[in-house]
Amino acid sequence: MKKIGILGATGSIGTQAIEIIRKFKNLYTIEFLVSYSNYEKLFKLAEEFNIYKVGIIDESVNVKSRKFKVYKGYEILELIENIDLLLVSTTGTFSIFPTLRAIENNINIALANKEILVSFGKIVKERLKNSKSTIIPVDSEHSAIFQLINPYKNEVERIILTASGGPFLNFNIEEMEKVNVEMALNHPTWKMGKKITIDSATLFNKALEIIEAYYLFNTKNIDVVVHPQSIVHSFVQLKDGSLLAQLSFPDMKIPIAYALSYPERLENPSTISHPYDFSNLTFIKPDFEKFPSLKIAYFCLEKLSYYPTIMNASNEVAVYSFLEGKIKFRDIFYIVEKTIEVLEKEKLSDETLEDLLYVDRISRDISNSLVSGKERI
Ligand code: MG
Protein backbone atom coordinates (compact mmCIF):
# COMPACT_ATOMS: atom_id res chain seq x y z
CA MET A 1 0.00 0.00 0.00
CA LYS A 2 1.33 3.41 -1.00
CA LYS A 3 0.68 6.08 1.62
CA ILE A 4 -0.42 9.32 0.03
CA GLY A 5 -1.00 12.88 1.20
CA ILE A 6 -2.97 15.25 -1.00
CA LEU A 7 -2.66 19.03 -1.10
CA GLY A 8 -5.44 20.61 -3.09
CA ALA A 9 -7.82 17.71 -2.55
CA THR A 10 -10.93 19.59 -3.65
CA GLY A 11 -9.48 21.16 -6.81
CA SER A 12 -9.57 19.80 -10.33
CA ILE A 13 -6.38 17.66 -10.15
CA GLY A 14 -7.02 16.59 -6.55
CA THR A 15 -10.54 15.45 -7.40
CA GLN A 16 -9.32 13.39 -10.35
CA ALA A 17 -6.53 11.87 -8.26
CA ILE A 18 -9.11 10.83 -5.67
CA GLU A 19 -11.27 9.28 -8.40
CA ILE A 20 -8.29 7.16 -9.45
CA ILE A 21 -7.55 6.18 -5.85
CA ARG A 22 -11.21 5.16 -5.43
CA LYS A 23 -10.72 2.78 -8.35
CA PHE A 24 -7.47 1.35 -6.93
CA LYS A 25 -8.27 1.20 -3.23
CA ASN A 26 -6.16 -1.93 -2.88
CA LEU A 27 -3.02 0.02 -3.84
CA TYR A 28 -3.32 3.34 -2.00
CA THR A 29 -4.24 4.73 1.37
CA ILE A 30 -4.76 8.45 1.87
CA GLU A 31 -3.08 9.65 5.07
CA PHE A 32 -4.33 13.24 4.96
CA LEU A 33 -6.21 15.69 2.77
CA VAL A 34 -5.65 19.41 2.49
CA SER A 35 -7.75 21.99 0.70
CA TYR A 36 -7.42 25.73 0.35
CA SER A 37 -10.73 26.67 1.96
CA ASN A 38 -13.50 24.29 0.87
CA TYR A 39 -13.91 22.40 4.16
CA GLU A 40 -17.35 21.00 3.37
CA LYS A 41 -16.07 18.96 0.46
CA LEU A 42 -12.89 18.19 2.41
CA PHE A 43 -14.80 16.73 5.37
CA LYS A 44 -16.99 14.67 3.06
CA LEU A 45 -13.91 13.14 1.44
CA ALA A 46 -12.24 12.59 4.81
CA GLU A 47 -15.32 10.72 5.97
CA GLU A 48 -15.43 8.59 2.84
CA PHE A 49 -11.76 7.55 3.13
CA ASN A 50 -11.75 7.31 6.91
CA ILE A 51 -9.14 10.01 7.32
CA TYR A 52 -8.55 11.70 10.66
CA LYS A 53 -6.10 14.45 9.63
CA VAL A 54 -7.22 17.25 7.35
CA GLY A 55 -5.76 20.65 6.55
CA ILE A 56 -7.08 24.03 5.47
CA ILE A 57 -4.54 26.45 4.02
CA ASP A 58 -6.64 29.61 4.42
CA GLU A 59 -6.28 30.49 8.09
CA SER A 60 -9.24 32.86 7.97
CA VAL A 61 -11.62 29.94 7.49
CA ASN A 62 -13.27 29.52 10.86
CA VAL A 63 -14.11 25.87 11.28
CA LYS A 64 -13.88 23.38 14.12
CA SER A 65 -14.53 19.68 14.04
CA ARG A 66 -15.07 16.94 16.61
CA LYS A 67 -14.48 14.25 14.06
CA PHE A 68 -11.29 15.42 12.39
CA LYS A 69 -8.03 16.94 13.50
CA VAL A 70 -7.88 20.17 11.50
CA TYR A 71 -4.46 21.65 10.66
CA LYS A 72 -4.46 25.26 9.53
CA GLY A 73 -2.01 27.36 7.54
CA TYR A 74 1.59 26.46 8.33
CA GLU A 75 0.52 23.70 10.75
CA ILE A 76 -0.03 21.69 7.59
CA LEU A 77 3.74 21.21 7.37
CA GLU A 78 3.49 18.86 10.38
CA LEU A 79 1.49 16.49 8.18
CA ILE A 80 4.31 16.02 5.67
CA GLU A 81 5.91 12.91 7.20
CA ASN A 82 5.58 9.12 7.10
CA ILE A 83 4.07 9.05 3.63
CA ASP A 84 5.39 7.67 0.34
CA LEU A 85 4.04 10.36 -1.96
CA LEU A 86 2.82 13.92 -1.62
CA LEU A 87 0.51 15.18 -4.37
CA VAL A 88 0.94 18.93 -4.63
CA SER A 89 -2.00 20.26 -6.60
CA THR A 90 -2.54 23.52 -4.78
CA THR A 91 -1.80 26.76 -6.57
CA GLY A 92 0.00 29.76 -5.15
CA THR A 93 3.26 30.34 -3.34
CA PHE A 94 2.22 28.57 -0.12
CA SER A 95 2.85 25.24 -1.88
CA ILE A 96 6.61 25.80 -1.80
CA PHE A 97 6.70 25.16 1.96
CA PRO A 98 5.12 21.69 1.99
CA THR A 99 7.15 20.84 -1.13
CA LEU A 100 10.43 21.71 0.61
CA ARG A 101 9.30 19.82 3.71
CA ALA A 102 8.65 16.73 1.57
CA ILE A 103 12.13 17.04 0.04
CA GLU A 104 13.63 17.37 3.52
CA ASN A 105 11.82 14.18 4.60
CA ASN A 106 12.80 12.22 1.45
CA ILE A 107 9.21 11.94 0.27
CA ASN A 108 8.45 11.67 -3.45
CA ILE A 109 6.39 14.49 -4.90
CA ALA A 110 3.74 14.30 -7.60
CA LEU A 111 3.91 17.90 -8.71
CA ALA A 112 0.92 19.49 -10.38
CA ASN A 113 1.81 23.04 -9.36
CA LYS A 114 4.10 24.52 -11.99
CA GLU A 115 4.60 27.84 -10.17
CA ILE A 116 6.78 26.14 -7.54
CA LEU A 117 9.41 25.23 -10.10
CA VAL A 118 9.05 28.43 -12.10
CA SER A 119 9.41 30.75 -9.12
CA PHE A 120 11.59 28.73 -6.77
CA GLY A 121 13.22 26.17 -9.11
CA LYS A 122 16.70 27.21 -8.06
CA ILE A 123 16.02 26.49 -4.39
CA VAL A 124 14.08 23.28 -5.08
CA LYS A 125 16.99 21.92 -7.16
CA GLU A 126 19.52 22.76 -4.47
CA ARG A 127 17.47 21.00 -1.80
CA LEU A 128 16.91 17.95 -4.02
CA LYS A 129 20.67 17.35 -4.14
CA ASN A 130 20.70 16.18 -0.52
CA SER A 131 17.45 14.25 -0.67
CA LYS A 132 16.13 10.92 -1.87
CA SER A 133 12.90 12.46 -3.16
CA THR A 134 11.98 12.43 -6.81
CA ILE A 135 9.67 14.94 -8.42
CA ILE A 136 7.21 13.24 -10.74
CA PRO A 137 5.55 15.87 -12.92
CA VAL A 138 1.78 15.81 -13.30
CA ASP A 139 1.65 18.53 -15.95
CA SER A 140 0.71 16.54 -19.08
CA GLU A 141 3.63 17.79 -21.21
CA HIS A 142 6.22 17.17 -18.53
CA SER A 143 4.71 13.83 -17.67
CA ALA A 144 5.10 12.91 -21.34
CA ILE A 145 8.75 13.98 -21.32
CA PHE A 146 9.36 12.25 -17.99
CA GLN A 147 7.95 9.02 -19.46
CA LEU A 148 10.05 9.33 -22.62
CA ILE A 149 13.33 10.62 -21.33
CA ASN A 150 14.25 8.19 -18.57
CA PRO A 151 16.15 5.59 -20.63
CA TYR A 152 17.91 8.25 -22.72
CA LYS A 153 19.05 10.86 -20.22
CA ASN A 154 22.45 11.32 -21.89
CA GLU A 155 21.22 11.26 -25.46
CA VAL A 156 18.65 14.02 -25.39
CA GLU A 157 19.18 16.75 -27.95
CA ARG A 158 16.03 18.74 -27.43
CA ILE A 159 12.67 18.86 -25.71
CA ILE A 160 9.67 19.94 -27.76
CA LEU A 161 6.64 20.99 -25.76
CA THR A 162 3.28 20.85 -27.50
CA ALA A 163 0.77 23.65 -27.00
CA SER A 164 -2.90 23.53 -27.93
CA GLY A 165 -2.70 27.17 -28.98
CA GLY A 166 -5.78 27.98 -26.92
CA PRO A 167 -9.04 29.45 -28.21
CA PHE A 168 -7.40 32.39 -30.04
CA LEU A 169 -4.93 30.50 -32.15
CA ASN A 170 -6.51 31.78 -35.36
CA PHE A 171 -7.36 35.28 -34.15
CA ASN A 172 -5.37 38.23 -35.44
CA ILE A 173 -4.06 40.83 -33.01
CA GLU A 174 -7.04 43.12 -33.64
CA GLU A 175 -9.50 40.35 -32.85
CA MET A 176 -7.52 39.51 -29.74
CA GLU A 177 -7.99 43.08 -28.50
CA LYS A 178 -11.73 42.38 -28.28
CA VAL A 179 -11.49 39.15 -26.33
CA ASN A 180 -13.64 39.03 -23.19
CA VAL A 181 -13.47 36.81 -20.11
CA GLU A 182 -16.12 34.39 -21.32
CA MET A 183 -14.32 33.84 -24.64
CA ALA A 184 -10.99 33.31 -22.88
CA LEU A 185 -12.48 30.76 -20.49
CA ASN A 186 -13.70 28.60 -23.35
CA HIS A 187 -10.77 26.24 -23.97
CA PRO A 188 -11.07 24.02 -27.06
CA THR A 189 -9.51 20.77 -25.75
CA TRP A 190 -8.87 20.80 -21.99
CA LYS A 191 -11.29 21.35 -19.10
CA MET A 192 -9.37 23.09 -16.33
CA GLY A 193 -9.48 25.75 -13.61
CA LYS A 194 -9.90 29.44 -14.50
CA LYS A 195 -6.32 30.63 -13.99
CA ILE A 196 -4.78 27.91 -16.14
CA THR A 197 -7.48 28.32 -18.80
CA ILE A 198 -6.57 32.00 -19.20
CA ASP A 199 -2.90 31.02 -19.19
CA SER A 200 -3.64 28.62 -22.03
CA ALA A 201 -5.29 31.41 -23.99
CA THR A 202 -2.32 33.79 -23.56
CA LEU A 203 0.16 30.91 -23.93
CA PHE A 204 1.64 31.99 -20.60
CA ASN A 205 0.86 28.44 -19.60
CA LYS A 206 3.47 27.33 -22.15
CA ALA A 207 5.79 30.11 -21.02
CA LEU A 208 5.64 28.72 -17.47
CA GLU A 209 6.08 25.19 -18.80
CA ILE A 210 9.30 26.14 -20.62
CA ILE A 211 10.85 27.15 -17.30
CA GLU A 212 9.30 24.14 -15.57
CA ALA A 213 10.90 21.88 -18.20
CA TYR A 214 14.27 23.52 -17.68
CA TYR A 215 14.24 22.77 -13.96
CA LEU A 216 12.89 19.25 -14.39
CA PHE A 217 15.08 18.11 -17.26
CA ASN A 218 18.18 20.29 -17.06
CA THR A 219 18.29 21.58 -20.62
CA LYS A 220 17.75 24.96 -22.19
CA ASN A 221 17.19 23.35 -25.56
CA ILE A 222 13.40 23.61 -25.40
CA ASP A 223 11.09 24.25 -28.33
CA VAL A 224 7.35 24.84 -28.51
CA VAL A 225 5.11 23.53 -31.27
CA VAL A 226 1.41 24.35 -31.56
CA HIS A 227 -0.65 21.18 -31.81
CA PRO A 228 -4.35 22.10 -31.62
CA GLN A 229 -5.63 18.52 -31.14
CA SER A 230 -3.72 18.02 -27.83
CA ILE A 231 -3.06 14.36 -28.61
CA VAL A 232 0.75 14.40 -28.65
CA HIS A 233 1.66 15.64 -25.19
CA SER A 234 5.28 16.45 -26.04
CA PHE A 235 8.33 15.21 -27.91
CA VAL A 236 11.85 14.32 -26.95
CA GLN A 237 14.43 14.53 -29.72
CA LEU A 238 17.49 12.32 -29.30
CA LYS A 239 20.95 13.12 -30.65
CA ASP A 240 20.53 10.72 -33.60
CA GLY A 241 17.48 12.68 -34.76
CA SER A 242 14.86 10.27 -33.42
CA LEU A 243 11.72 11.98 -32.24
CA LEU A 244 9.89 10.26 -29.39
CA ALA A 245 6.33 11.20 -28.59
CA GLN A 246 3.71 10.28 -26.02
CA LEU A 247 0.10 10.23 -27.23
CA SER A 248 -3.28 9.89 -25.58
CA PHE A 249 -6.64 11.60 -25.36
CA PRO A 250 -6.37 14.94 -23.58
CA ASP A 251 -7.24 13.56 -20.17
CA MET A 252 -5.33 14.53 -17.02
CA LYS A 253 -6.16 11.14 -15.47
CA ILE A 254 -3.28 9.55 -17.40
CA PRO A 255 -0.47 11.80 -16.09
CA ILE A 256 -2.07 11.83 -12.62
CA ALA A 257 -2.26 8.03 -12.56
CA TYR A 258 1.35 7.75 -13.71
CA ALA A 259 2.51 10.13 -10.99
CA LEU A 260 0.64 8.07 -8.40
CA SER A 261 1.90 4.71 -9.61
CA TYR A 262 5.44 5.59 -10.78
CA PRO A 263 7.54 3.61 -11.52
CA GLU A 264 4.71 1.10 -12.02
CA ARG A 265 1.67 1.66 -14.21
CA LEU A 266 -2.00 1.23 -13.42
CA GLU A 267 -4.38 -0.77 -15.53
CA ASN A 268 -6.92 1.36 -17.44
CA PRO A 269 -6.99 4.42 -15.21
CA SER A 270 -8.82 6.21 -18.02
CA THR A 271 -10.15 5.74 -21.55
CA ILE A 272 -7.70 3.78 -23.67
CA SER A 273 -6.98 5.34 -27.05
CA HIS A 274 -6.11 3.81 -30.41
CA PRO A 275 -4.38 5.54 -33.34
CA TYR A 276 -7.68 5.19 -35.24
CA ASP A 277 -9.12 7.69 -32.75
CA PHE A 278 -6.69 10.36 -33.88
CA SER A 279 -6.91 11.98 -37.26
CA ASN A 280 -5.27 15.01 -38.84
CA LEU A 281 -2.67 15.71 -36.21
CA THR A 282 -1.14 19.07 -37.07
CA PHE A 283 1.96 20.86 -35.81
CA ILE A 284 2.42 24.58 -36.35
CA LYS A 285 5.07 27.14 -35.46
CA PRO A 286 3.89 29.43 -32.66
CA ASP A 287 3.44 33.13 -33.44
CA PHE A 288 5.65 35.12 -31.07
CA GLU A 289 4.11 38.46 -32.09
CA LYS A 290 0.59 37.34 -31.24
CA PHE A 291 1.81 35.60 -28.11
CA PRO A 292 4.62 37.70 -26.58
CA SER A 293 4.38 35.35 -23.57
CA LEU A 294 6.72 32.97 -25.37
CA LYS A 295 9.24 35.71 -26.07
CA ILE A 296 9.14 36.63 -22.39
CA ALA A 297 9.65 32.98 -21.42
CA TYR A 298 12.77 32.60 -23.57
CA PHE A 299 14.14 35.85 -22.18
CA CYS A 300 13.58 34.50 -18.65
CA LEU A 301 15.07 31.12 -19.60
CA GLU A 302 18.20 32.90 -20.77
CA LYS A 303 18.43 35.04 -17.62
CA LEU A 304 17.10 32.50 -15.07
CA SER A 305 17.83 33.66 -11.47
CA TYR A 306 14.73 35.54 -10.28
CA TYR A 307 13.42 36.41 -13.74
CA PRO A 308 10.99 33.46 -13.95
CA THR A 309 9.79 34.44 -10.45
CA ILE A 310 8.87 37.88 -11.77
CA MET A 311 7.15 36.40 -14.82
CA ASN A 312 5.02 34.06 -12.73
CA ALA A 313 4.02 36.57 -10.05
CA SER A 314 3.24 39.30 -12.52
CA ASN A 315 1.25 37.01 -14.78
CA GLU A 316 -0.83 35.82 -11.85
CA VAL A 317 -1.74 39.40 -10.91
CA ALA A 318 -2.52 40.21 -14.55
CA VAL A 319 -4.72 37.12 -15.03
CA TYR A 320 -6.84 37.79 -11.93
CA SER A 321 -7.11 41.47 -12.94
CA PHE A 322 -8.37 40.37 -16.35
CA LEU A 323 -10.85 37.96 -14.75
CA GLU A 324 -12.11 40.81 -12.57
CA GLY A 325 -12.61 42.96 -15.64
CA LYS A 326 -9.91 45.46 -14.66
CA ILE A 327 -7.74 45.07 -17.75
CA LYS A 328 -8.07 43.84 -21.32
CA PHE A 329 -6.86 40.47 -22.52
CA ARG A 330 -3.72 41.71 -24.26
CA ASP A 331 -2.87 43.93 -21.28
CA ILE A 332 -1.76 40.72 -19.57
CA PHE A 333 1.32 40.73 -21.84
CA TYR A 334 1.92 44.42 -21.18
CA ILE A 335 1.75 44.01 -17.39
CA VAL A 336 4.29 41.18 -17.38
CA GLU A 337 6.67 42.87 -19.83
CA LYS A 338 6.52 46.13 -17.94
CA THR A 339 7.04 44.52 -14.53
CA ILE A 340 10.17 42.77 -15.80
CA GLU A 341 11.36 46.05 -17.30
CA VAL A 342 10.89 47.88 -13.99
CA LEU A 343 12.63 45.19 -11.95
CA GLU A 344 15.54 44.84 -14.37
CA LYS A 345 16.81 48.11 -12.98
CA GLU A 346 16.68 46.91 -9.38
CA LYS A 347 19.42 45.06 -7.57
CA LEU A 348 17.74 41.91 -6.33
CA SER A 349 19.11 38.68 -4.96
CA ASP A 350 18.25 35.03 -5.65
CA GLU A 351 20.34 33.28 -3.01
CA THR A 352 17.66 32.13 -0.58
CA LEU A 353 14.00 31.24 -0.55
CA GLU A 354 13.35 34.52 1.28
CA ASP A 355 15.07 36.43 -1.54
CA LEU A 356 12.80 34.82 -4.13
CA LEU A 357 9.72 35.32 -1.97
CA TYR A 358 10.67 38.99 -1.81
CA VAL A 359 10.97 39.14 -5.61
CA ASP A 360 7.58 37.44 -5.83
CA ARG A 361 6.02 40.06 -3.54
CA ILE A 362 7.61 43.11 -5.13
CA SER A 363 6.63 41.84 -8.61
CA ARG A 364 3.01 41.58 -7.47
CA ASP A 365 3.12 45.11 -6.05
CA ILE A 366 4.49 46.56 -9.28
CA SER A 367 2.02 44.61 -11.43
CA ASN A 368 -0.87 45.75 -9.24
CA SER A 369 0.12 49.38 -9.61
CA LEU A 370 0.45 48.88 -13.37
CA VAL A 371 -3.07 47.42 -13.37
CA SER A 372 -4.36 50.50 -11.50
CA GLY A 373 -2.66 52.68 -14.12
CA LYS A 374 -4.46 50.79 -16.88
CA GLU A 375 -7.78 51.05 -15.04
CA ARG A 376 -7.57 54.82 -14.95
CA ILE A 377 -7.14 55.06 -18.72
MG1 MG B 1 0.46 21.46 -19.33
Image: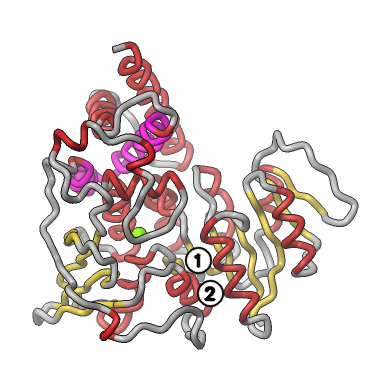
Quadrant of the image containing the C terminus:
top left
The residue where tag 2 is placed is 260
At label 1, counting other C-alpha atoms closer than 10 Å, the crowd grade (few under 14, some 14-19, many 20 or more) is many
Q: Quadrant of the N terminus?
A: bottom right
How far across and how far down the image is residue 179, in percent? 27, 36
In the rendered structure, the answer to whether residue 272 lies left or right of residue 85 reads left
Where does label 1 land, which residue?
Answer: 110
Residue 41's disc is none
Q: Position of residue 20 (x, y in %)?
A: 57, 74
- Residue 309 within the magenta-colored segment of the rendering: yes
In this orientation, which residue lies closer to the viewer: 73 or 14? 14
Contact (Cβ within 8 Å) of mark 2 with mark 1: yes
Look at label 1 and name its amino acid.
Ala
Q: Quadrant of residue 72?
A: top right
Q: Secondary structure at mark 2?
A: helix
Q: Residue furthest top?
A: 376
Magenta segment, which residues?
293-322
- Taking the spot 52% from the left edge, 61% from the top edge, the residue there is 13
SS at badge 1: strand
